[in-house]
C-alpha cells in the first residue's frame, strides 16, 4: 500500500491504520484528552510510528523536528485532513508524489477556513468534499477527486461538519484504494473564475439583520450553529443564538426585532414574518425571551 505521512484529525489516522495503510509518521493538529487522540497515540507507540506535534510541520518546527521528518524513509504522499496550520514549502516536498489536502467544500467554491458556515449561509443547494494537490496558496491546487452531498432541510454548519467528516473518510479510502490498484487520480485545474472564499466569520458577519425576511434570519442562525453562534441585540441586550425556526405572523404594528409571545412561546419579528430563537444566551447564561416581550 502507498506510504503516507499523515497530518490531521485523529479519526482519519485510525481509519487509515484500520484499512492497512502504511503511515511513515503522524502529525496531530492538537493533543486533547479525547478517546480518538489517545487511540492514535497508543497505536503509534505499539506500531513504532513516529508521532509529531502540529508545529513540527510548520515553519515553527524545531531543527530537531524538521530533521526527523526529513530523515524519514520518504513516503509517497503527505496527506492532510483538518490541519489548520500553514504548511511550508519544505514540508510540502516530503512526499515523493506530492501533498494532498482534503477540503470540506466543492472547490473552487468556499476556499478557506470555514466552508461549513459559508455553505449554509449562502444557501448552497449542495456541499461536498474535494481532495486536491497542495500548493503554496490555500486550497488552490489541482482537483484530484470530489464528492457532493445535498444540503438537508434545516442544515446547520455543525450537522454539515459531521456529514462531510464522514464523507471525507470514505472518499479518501476509495481514492487510496484506486492508487493501490495502480490508478492515480488525474489532476484537474481549478477554474479561478468560480472561486469564492470562506474566511473565519467576523463579529459583523455573525450579527443578525432582523430587517431581513425570517427565512434569511433562520438560515443565518443555522450557519453559525453550534459555534460560534449568531449575534443579536434584543431589547438592548447583546445575545448569542444557536438555533432558529420560522415563527407566526407578528401582531399588526410589530417592528423588526420586537419580541412577542403567542401561546406561551416567544418570537422575534423579522422584516417579513418572525423567528423563534433557541439556545439564547446572555453573557453565557441562558435567557428566556418571554421576559423581553413588551420591551422596546
Image (tube, rainbow, N blue to C red):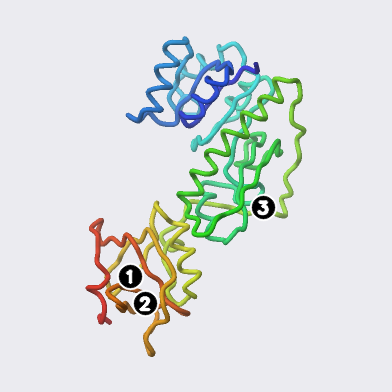
Most extreme residue toward the bottom, as rendered?
253
Q: What element carries label 2?
A: loop
Query: Which residue appears at 48% of the width and 43% of the height?
Result: 162
- Tell me the CA gap for discs 1 and 3: 33 Å
List the residue tagged with mark 2: 257
Viewer-proximal residue among 179 and 82 = 179
The N terminus: image quadrant: top right
Q: Measured from the top left, where is residue 276 in percent x and y?
A: 37, 69
List the residue tagged with mark 1: 233
- Tell me the CA gap for discs 2 and 1: 8 Å
Q: Measured from the top left, where is residue 191 in percent x and y?
A: 74, 49
Looking at the image, tell me whether mark 2 or mark 1 is earlier in sequence order. Answer: 1
- Tell me the CA gap for discs 2 and 3: 35 Å
Q: Are marks 1 and 3 in contact (CB under 8 Å)?
A: no
Query: Which residue appears at 26% of the width and 78% of the height?
Result: 293
Q: Are marks 2 and 1 in contact (CB under 8 Å)?
A: yes
Amino acid at each position: 500500500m502507498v506510504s503516507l505521512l499523515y497530518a490531521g484529525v485523529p479519526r482519519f489516522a485510525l481509519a487509515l491504520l484500520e484499512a492497512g495503510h502504511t503511515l511513515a509518521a503522524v502529525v496531530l493538529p492538537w493533543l486533547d484528552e479525547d478517546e480518538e487522540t489517545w487511540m492514535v497515540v497508543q497505536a503509534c507507540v505499539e506500531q513504532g510510528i513516529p508521532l509529531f506535534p502540529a508545529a513540527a510541520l510548520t515553519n515553527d518546527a524545531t531543527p530537531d523536528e524538521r530533521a526527523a521528518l526529513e530523515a524519514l524513509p520518504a513516503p509517497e504522499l503527505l496527506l492532510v485532513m483538518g490541519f489548520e496550520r500553514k504548511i511550508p514549502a519544505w514540508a510540502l516536498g516530503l512526499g515523493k508524489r506530492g501533498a494532498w489536502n482534503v477540503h470540506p467544500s466543492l472547490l473552487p467554491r468556499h476556499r478557506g477556513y470555514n466552508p461549513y458556515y459559508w455553505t449554509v449561509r449562502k444557501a448552497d443547494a449542495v456541499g461536498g468534499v474535494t481532495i486536491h494537490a497542495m500548493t503554496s496558496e490555500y486550497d488552490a491546487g489541482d482537483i484530484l477527486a470530489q464528492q457532493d452531498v445535498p444540503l438537508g432541510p434545516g442544515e446547520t454548519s455543525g450537522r454539515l461538519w459531521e456529514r462531510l467528516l464522514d464523507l471525507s473518510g470514505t472518499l479518501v479510502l476509495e481514492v487510496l484504494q484506486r492508487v493501490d490498484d495502480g490508478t492515480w487520480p488525474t489532476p484537474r485545474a481549478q477554474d479561478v473564475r468560480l472561486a469564492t472564499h470562506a474566511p473565519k466569520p467576523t463579529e459583523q458577519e455573525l450579527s443578525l439583520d432582523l430587517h431581513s425576511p425570517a427565512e434569511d434570519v433562520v438560515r443565518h442562525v443555522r450557519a453559525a450553529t453550534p459555534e460560534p453562534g449568531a449575534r443579536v441585540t434584543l431589547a438592548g441586550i447583546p445575545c448569542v443564538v444557536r438555533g432558529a425556526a420560522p415563527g407566526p405572523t407578528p401582531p399588526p404594528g410589530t417592528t423588526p426585532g420586537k419580541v412577542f409571545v403567542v401561546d406561551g412561546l416567544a418570537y422575534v419579528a423579522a422584516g417579513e414574518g418572525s423567528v423563534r430563537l433557541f439556545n439564547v444566551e446572555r453573557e453565557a447564561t441562558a435567557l428566556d425571551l418571554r421576559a423581553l416581550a413588551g420591551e422596546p
